[in-house]
Image: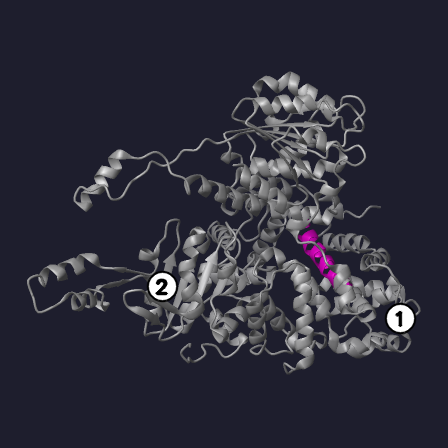
């Protein structure tokens, strides 16, 4: 049974405003899913292209709820000992040696002793479960672990508990808000997906992007932000190897501000394209697209 | 967002009552019919989620359902379609005949508000209605809607336009596309676009820089797209009212991107396929890379084992193995690029080259009745699409008449490149084996198989069509290591996965 808990957010609008307060501009779907996750006590699986603010979402939610962020960065070869818990065997060994010759203790007492709390090294997942204070657990790039390792997460995600054979089951005292992010380099298992709410964060709509640029880039004018957002939208509509992400858009906007550009011309855009795009073929293609006049809107006489 | 104030967004009764549950039940069944896997727990989660969102808010309702039931981004489109059908503005369904009522009173500056009211009286039958608004007025409204990008105004324009131009009649057995076409034909969106651009140009003094022009054009195009969506929604809404939800859902059911048939994909679907292929190749590359490193053991690493035995007091309790270095296969792709199977060949070439780092060497050949090597187009370019395009335009593949002649193509291959097929080579042949009754020269395949590591044939036709008419895939197939039906991305992915 899950422990009773207070809700973190009042309403969807509440989520949006709270996130806005920490400079994270969400949209209807992001705020809606975060709100549902809070109400339903379910983890959120966040997917989407790189650089659209998946990790940032977890950080911002932690910040706005005043919770501690516990982060588990996934990588190939991640195992139980790194993700859940580990026995501090050096300390156990010391203990055994210290008590050697003490005939009053028999074996069962001793084994109870060395598998106690004192000898347990908590890793991020266990830490999140045992935390007394509010926490947000971020499991980053979960698609990097092997499909077998995913199973480690299942117990935690559905029941918020960890079973340690020597100690029994540790249940959460309070339910952390859990975010899993994935870059979709492989299909996650059905079992994992079933336990989560799914949120796809795509490149933002033009209005939201403009707002993000305005909030995050100091000293930018509204016209420039508008132009930046529109150029980026046009670039994203091209068929490229890697479309510019939000963070790259921000870098670009920053660059334009530093260069003292008021109004982006083709020359400015083409000169600074390498900040938005990382492949030479993409840059060449985009430069060509941006600077060649499009005749398709010419009115035919 | 002002969704809640919108009259269109009150789709369902407010409490989670029996009718809603039944509707949701049908909705879930339809999702499953559209091959979106919705498990029982997910269904229950969705019900639970709905208790926490205001049911009057259509957007929130949609996201609650999506977050709990759709766990794959490529299924989103299908979900959206089903959602639109099931929850398409049921609130003012009755308002269909008399259009005026359901209309939110827009802040009618230009669009004459009373015109709408008058229409309400006569709007009963499709064509005759709406005569209160002259075509000029409608054109003006359309112009204003696109100029301002106002969704409410667009919705109104599309309602009027559909009513007037689509000629929808109850029970008429034509699809939504037909109505869409009829409506759009009458609206002359291209003309409006040109006019808007012309005026934008006037505004800045007659001359725009190419960049400005491009941006402005994209902006307007975007709005026109929105308008088109509104029109589609309006048509769909009327069709649902006419035919009922289940029937509509059935007609609009589309295969998911990974299930789209290569040979019958529309242009739209092709574009989607092209988009889908990039993440797919990335996934495949990662998976193949992992497979290479895992699950196999190399030879015993003696030194490492001894070193680790130290921690067990010299007992080699933990054996260590060398990292395996399995050989990467050498690939030769021979693709038929004649009309019907060209799309399939394109996708396969694209896929193979996108993961070419997983192979030690990839060479590709294309043919119709002649054969040409096209490896050079792919070398030294990062842009696979461009290369595929060059293959289509520059390769010299026609020998006599431009009808597929597998026999001759294989002969050329055998003559020119047969020597280069070695025991490490995997030969992949792409085509439907429709040979136009030329001689098959199947002995070449047999010879190839003896020289090569393996020979595979991928056929984009459904298995039931094989060996009918001039298809002789069976004759070739008996000499191959395997013949596979490969009609969609899912099957293609499966094949490539097993290849490396």
Give the SS element for disc 1. Answer: loop
Image quadrant containing the N terminus of chain A: bottom left
Q: CA distance from mark 1 to mark 2?
A: 64 Å
Q: Which mark is residue A125?
A: 2
Q: Chain of mark 2?
A: A
Q: What span is in magenta?
A: B213-231
Looking at the picture, how far across and down is residue B57, in whole percent? 63, 76
Q: Which mark is residue B138?
A: none
Tell me what residue is drawn at x 45 percent, y 79 percent. A7
Place of residue B78 in the rendered image (x, y in percent of width and height, measured from the top left): 67, 59
Counting from the top left corner in percent of width and height, residue B162 is at 83, 65
Closer-to-camera residue (B141/B257):
B257
Closer to the camera in the image, B100 or B135: B100
The vertical placement of B142 against B369, above or below, is: below
Is residue A241 in sight in this rendering? Answer: yes
Q: Is residue B209 magenta?
A: no
Quarter occupied by residue B125: bottom right
Q: Is residue A122 left or right of residue A90?
A: right
Q: Position of residue A190 (x, y in %)?
A: 52, 59
How many marks the image carries: the answer is: 2
């Amino acid at each position: 049974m899950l422990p009773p808990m207070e809700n973190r957010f009042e309403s969807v609008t509440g989520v949006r405003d709270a996130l806005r307060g920490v400079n994270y501009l969400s949209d209807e779907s992001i705020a809606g899913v975060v709100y549902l996750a809070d109400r339903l006590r379910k983890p959120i699986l966040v997917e989407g292209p790189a650089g659209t603010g998946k990790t940032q979402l977890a950080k911002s939610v932690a910040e706005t709820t005043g919770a501690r962020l516990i982060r588990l960065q996934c990588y190939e070869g991640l195992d139980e000992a790194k993700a859940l818990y580990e026995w501090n065997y050096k300390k156990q060994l010391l203990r055994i040696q210290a008590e050697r010759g003490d005939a009053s203790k028999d074996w069962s007492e001793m084994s109870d002793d060395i598998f106690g709390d004192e000898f347990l090294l908590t890793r991020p997942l266990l830490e999140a479960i045992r935390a007394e204070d509010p926490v947000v657990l971020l499991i980053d790039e979960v698609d990097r672990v092997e499909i077998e390792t995913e199973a480690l997460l299942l117990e935690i995600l559905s029941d918020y508990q960890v079973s340690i054979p020597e100690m029994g089951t540790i249940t959460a005292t309070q339910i952390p808000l859990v975010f899993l992010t994935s870059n979709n380099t492989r299909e996650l298992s059905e079992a994992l997906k079933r336990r989560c709410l799914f949120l796809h964060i795509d490149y933002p709509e033009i209005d939201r992007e403009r707002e993000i640029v305005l909030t995050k880039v100091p000293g930018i004018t509204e016209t420039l932000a508008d132009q930046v957002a529109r150029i980026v939208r046009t670039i994203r509509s091209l068929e490229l190897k890697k479309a510019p992400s939000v963070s790259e858009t921000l870098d670009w906007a920053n660059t334009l501000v530093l260069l003292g550009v008021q109004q982006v011309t083709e020359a400015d855009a083409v000169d600074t394209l390498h900040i938005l795009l990382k492949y030479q073929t993409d840059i060449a293609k985009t430069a060509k697209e941006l600077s060649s006049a499009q005749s398709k809107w010419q009115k035919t006489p | 967002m002002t969704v809640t104030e919108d009259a269109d967004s009150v789709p369902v009764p407010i409490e989670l009552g029996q009718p809603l549950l039944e509707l949701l039940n049908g909705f879930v069944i339809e999702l499953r019919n559209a091959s979106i896997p919705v498990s029982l727990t997910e269904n229950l989660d969705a019900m639970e989620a709905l208790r926490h969102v205001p049911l009057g808010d259509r957007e929130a309702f949609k996201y609650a359902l999506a977050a709990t039931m759709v766990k794959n981004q490529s299924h989103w489109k299908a979900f959206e379609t089903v959602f639109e059908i099931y929850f398409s503005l049921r609130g003012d369904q009755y308002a269909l005949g008399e259009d005026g009522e359901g209309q939110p009173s827009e802040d009618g500056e230009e669009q004459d508000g009373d015109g709408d009211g008058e229409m309400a009286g006569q709007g009963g039958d499709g064509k005759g209605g709406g005569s209160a608004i002259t075509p000029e007025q409608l054109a003006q409204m359309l112009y204003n809607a696109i100029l301002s990008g106002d969704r409410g105004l667009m919705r109104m324009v599309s309602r009027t336009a559909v009513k007037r131009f689509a000629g929808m009649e109850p029970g008429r057995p034509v699809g939504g596309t037909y109505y869409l076409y009829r409506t759009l034909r009458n609206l002359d969106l291209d003309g409006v676009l040109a006019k808007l651009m012309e005026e934008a140009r006037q505004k800045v003094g007659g001359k725009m820089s190419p960049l400005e022009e491009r941006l402005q054009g994209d902006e307007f195009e975007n709005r026109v797209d929105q308008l088109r969506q509104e029109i589609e929604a309006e048509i769909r809404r009327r069709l649902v009212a006419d035919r009922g939800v289940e029937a509509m859902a059935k007609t609009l059911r589309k295969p998911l991107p990974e299930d789209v048939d290569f040979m019958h994909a529309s242009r739209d679907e092709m574009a989607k396929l092209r988009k889908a292929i990039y993440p797919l190749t990335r996934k495949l590359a990662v998976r193949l890379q992992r497979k290479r490193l895992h699950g196999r053991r190399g030879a015993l690493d003696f030194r490492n084992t001894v070193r680790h035995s130290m921690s067990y007091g010299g007992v080699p309790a933990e054996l260590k193995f060398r990292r395996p270095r399995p050989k990467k296969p050498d690939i030769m792709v021979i693709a038929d690029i004649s009309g019907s199977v060209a799309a399939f060949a394109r996708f396969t070439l694209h896929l193979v080259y996108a993961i070419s780092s997983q192979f030690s060497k990839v060479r590709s050949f294309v043919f119709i009745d002649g054969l040409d090597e096209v490896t050079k187009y792919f070398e030294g370019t990062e842009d696979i699409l461009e290369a595929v395009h060059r293959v289509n335009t520059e390769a010299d593949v026609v020998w006599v008449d431009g009808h597929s002649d597998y026999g001759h193509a294989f002969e050329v291959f055998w003559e020119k490149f047969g020597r280069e097929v070695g025991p490490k080579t995997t030969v992949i042949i792409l085509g439907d084996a429709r040979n136009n009754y030329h001689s098959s020269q199947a002995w070449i395949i047999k010879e190839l198989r003896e020289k090569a590591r393996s020979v595979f044939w991928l056929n984009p036709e459904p298995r039931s069509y094989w060996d009918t008419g001039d298809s002789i895939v069976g004759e070739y197939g008996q000499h191959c290591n395997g013949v596979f039906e490969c009609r969609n991305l899912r099957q293609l992915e499966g094949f490539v996965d097993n290849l490396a």
